Image (tube, grey):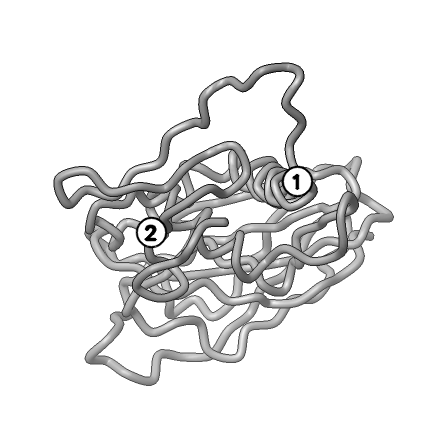
Amino acid sequence: MGKYKKGILGPFRGIVGTVVGAIWKGIHYMRSLPDVSPDRKPTPAQLNQQLRFSTVMEFLKPLKVLLEIGYQAFTDGISPFNAACSYHLKYAVMGTAPDYLINPVKVVFSVGDLEEPQDPGVTTGGAAKVLFDWGALVDTDHGAATDKATFMVYNPTLLKYVTLRNAVARTALTFTLPLPAAWIGHDVHCYMAFVSLDGKQVSNSVYAGEMPVI
């Protein structure tokens, strides 16, 4: 079983799913497990870890571009994508084998020191639109009026996402995001975060809520 180091987003050592976390010359890395004999069956514990890992990978792979930005602060021997995997493996998997799912409330696509969105909320905008709103900046030492909002909407029924980066300035306090018409009648989960104007700083992403698309 893999062991987590340096907190919830640190690298891991040991086996998680079909990969191994290890250290070489001070660098944390992940590698695939070698092929095993077809006569050698995985243990129940190994199968369990593989299922958890595949659940996380299936969820995160379409979000790789977003995660490369949101987890950019993790440069100590671990890639942004691997940092995101580490967090979601430990905190965002729910259910029991073999029916593991991602807990939408625990999803985090961005981690950083910028002030996160204050009191975020979502309401239906009608015609397959979602209206985001948030409060004004409180801590000017950790944010600016020019920070740009990034939005993500997840449809668990279709396993699809709508993302929009650098959509509007923090001071806008509201934004209407169009969704595919095919999503009408589905419930979706909504998230947002901020990125500095130069793209070098990010906030934690926040869960803005669940809503039906109408």
In terms of image quadrants, where is residue 26? top left
Q: Residue at x 66, y 38 (%)?
A: 43
**Disc assigned to residue 134:** none
| Residue 11 circle label | 2
- Measuring from the top left, give residue 95's x and y in whole percent: 75, 56
Residue at point 27%, 45% (across, down): 78
**Horizontal and vertical percent position of residue 113:** 28, 69
At mark 2, the secondary structure is loop
The residue that mark 1 highlights is 51
Of all residues, the one furthest to the right in this rendering is 185
Q: Amino acid at mark 2?
A: Pro
Provide the secondary structure element on which disc 1 rests.
Answer: helix
In the depicted view, which residue is nearer to us: 77 or 5?
5
138, above or below 150, in the image? below
Count neighbours of disc 2 (C-alpha within 10 A) and say few if under 14, some if 14 to 19, many if 20 or more.
many
> Compared with residue 27, is residue 90 higher up or lower down, i.e. above or below?
below
Q: Of label 1 and label 2, which has the lower sequence position?
A: 2
